[in-house]
Structure formats: C-alpha cells, structure tokens
Image (spheres, grey):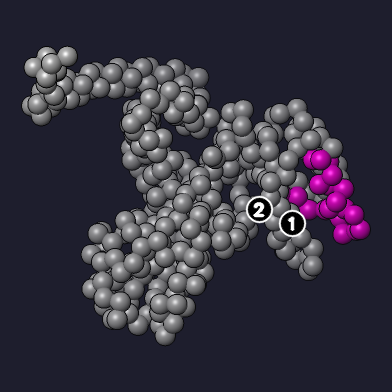
Amino acid sequence: MSSKAARKPDSIETLRARIDELNLEILRLVSERAEVAVEIGRLKHSMDAVVYHPAREREVIERILAENPGPLSAEHLTRIFTEIISACRSLEHMPRVAFLGPEHTYSHEAARARFGSSVEFVPEPSIAGVFEAAGSGRADFGVVPIENSTEGSVTLTLDLLIDTALVIIGEILLPIRHAMLSRTGERSAVRRIVSHQQSLGQCRGYIAQNFSGCELEAVASNALAAQRAAEDPACAAIASASAAEPYGLRIIAENIQDVAQNTTRFLVLGARPVERSGRDKTTVLFAVPDRVGALNQALGLFARNRINVTKIESRPLRGRPWEYLFFVDLAGHRNDPRVKRALASLERKTLFLKVLGSYPEAR
C-alpha cells in the first residue's frame, strides 16, 4: 500500500468532537440509570427495605471489573462506579455517615471510598462519638478503624463493640500512605512531630532515622495534627498527603511509613444486619468458663464445621481480673448452615455470646 493510500491520523479537533459525542451518550445512560434507581427507591420504600445494600454494590463493581477491556485500571473503574452508585443512591435517600473527624483523616478517606461523595458526612471528635452518632440515629452509618497491619488492633473500638446495639455491616481495607507536612516544608525547621499514636508507631523507623531529636506528640487524629502544624512553623504533622492543601501545608516527604504495604481495616456500623453476599465474614464476641481447655473446645467447634477462623483477639473482662472476652473473625455468614450450626453449639459452651455482624469480606 502506498503512503498516499495510508489513512491519515485523526486531528485533535476530530477526536475532541468524538469525545463530545461520547460525553452526551454517557450522560444519557447515566440519567437512565438514575431513573431506574429512583424507581427501585420507591419499591424499597414501599417494602421498608434498606437503601444501602453492600453485597449488591460489590456485585455491581465486580461485574464491571470482570468485563473491563482497558485502558482504565480496576482502581479507576472502582472510583468511577462508586461515585455513580453514590449519586444514584442519594436519589433514594441521602445517607449520613459518621467518621472520626475532622475531615481529611484516614477515616474520612475510608468513608468516601465506601460510600462515595454523595452522602452527608458527619465528623465526630472521637471513636466513641461515631458509635453514639450511629446508635442514636444522628447518622445512618458509622465508620471506625479496627486494626492496622503494622500496629495491630484499635482496642477502643473493640471495647465499644461489647455494649453497642449496632451491627457490623461492612469492612474497608485502606492502604495507608503517610506524609510529613509542615507550614514551610523545610525539614530543618521541625522541632515537634504531631500525629495520631498509631501513625507515630507506623513511622517509628523513619522518625528515628530522620528526626531523632524531635519531640513527639500524640493527638486524637491526623487531621488535628495538620491543624496544629498549620498554627506552628516548628511543628510537623504526619498525615495523608491529601491533608496538605486544605490546611495550607507543604509536603516534606511522602510514603514515610515503615512498612510499604501498611493497611488499616475499618468497620462499617449500622442498625440493621445485611444479607449474604456469597463471600462473607462474621465477627463474634464470647467469654468462656475459666477452666482448662475451654477456649480450645470453643474454637474447635469452628474446625469441626470446616469454618476458617481468620482472627482472634482477647480483651479483659470488666470486673473479672485475669478473665477475658474473645473477638473472633470467621469465614462465612451467620445464616450459612455450617456457621449457624457452629454458633448454636458455641452458645451452649460459653458464658456469653454476641454476634457482632456478618458482612461482605473486603478484597
């Protein structure tokens, strides 16, 4: 084929015109999807059904990812469709989501990653405040940290789960990428480093190597640390890089966490249990008699029913020195026959048993 017969590449103007056409087609399809969502909302309201259905939302996104032809990545598509789902859900009902505030904390990022932007976010000054907001009805849902892959469990969250009437309806796995922020961005000006206790622990090696002479101060949240750094030029905050612009800070260094795959697991709390998704996790809380082999016998019930225990954590039993409550994560939904059978047997062998929730397992 001669060079004259070869097809000339499209001009920028031609490609932009095609994008304009595609944008209108996307608008038409998104609007049509929103109309269907409104009709679903009417049906849910007539049946008093829940608006937030995490298993269904995960199914929608996983189907999209399975059909992804590229070039957009799975992460890009997840963000896009999370926002589409969020916007359409808000036409049924605008959820209120409480989180450990203020804004730009990792809890805020986790809440946005799960619910999208089309919700009313309710920042709370403490984890206890998140429980209270969701439990009292000031918020529909609460998002709280439960454990970090580097620093372990958030014991306050575990303790608050003991007495709450809320149930766990979801979990979020958020990669944690810490940054060092200050007003000037000058490393030499830093005399004090402020952050949440967990974040200080996650960056212990970096701090020792680069800021060994600095005073360390733990505060309630990383966003509060950013506020402190904005007020004091000698103060640096460890927080998300996304907190820099809102607080007028500059980035000294990024990705300063000691473990590259640093991840925090968050729980989503709600008033009503959620249905099975086919790939679920159940969290239970129980106490066993203080006798030899009691815990082993309790855990053996899961093995006999071929149920995988993915985590076990103990907390002191209030008012009973040297006796403990056990938090256990196990594979499956409480309505799965094997799980139901194991829990019924466990209840007969324990002093106390509480199913904290069954929910879709995070990927």
Q: Which quadrant would the N terminus be assigned to in this image?
A: top left
Distance from disc 1 to disc 2, alpha carbons, whole Å, reads 9 Å
Q: Position of residue 345 (x, y in %)?
A: 84, 38
Q: Amino acid at mark 1?
A: Leu
Q: For the residue carrying disc 1, how many other residues have a C-alpha within 10 Å: few (<14), some (14-19), or many (20+)?
A: many
- 39 on left or right of 267: left
Q: Quadrant of residue 342?
A: top right
To which quarter of the image does residue 341 belong?
top right
The number of discs equals 2
Q: Nearer the viewer, residue 45 or 276?
A: 276
Q: Badge 1 is on which residue?
A: 325
Picture coordinates of residue 220 (x, y %)? 45, 66
Q: Are marks 1 and 2 in contact (CB under 8 Å)?
A: yes
Is 109 placed left or right of 20 in the picture? right
Q: Looking at numbered disc 2 in the image, what kind of residue is underneath it?
A: Ile
**Residue ID at (36%, 63%):** 254
Residue at the extreme bottom: 213
The verdict on residue 219 being magenta is: no
Residue picked out by circle 2: 162
**Residue shown at 40% from the left, 61% from the top:** 255
- Residue 172 in picture, x, y percent from top left: 50, 45
Give me the residue at 74% from left, 56% from top: 325
Secondary element at image label 2: helix
User: Can residue 101 be seen in this snapshot?
Assistant: no
Is disc 2 surrounded by few (<14), some (14 to 19) or many (20+) residues within 10 Å?
A: some
Range drawn in magenta: 285-303
Sequence-wise, the earlier of marks 1 and 2 is 2
- Tell me the residue at 78%/53% (across/down): 287
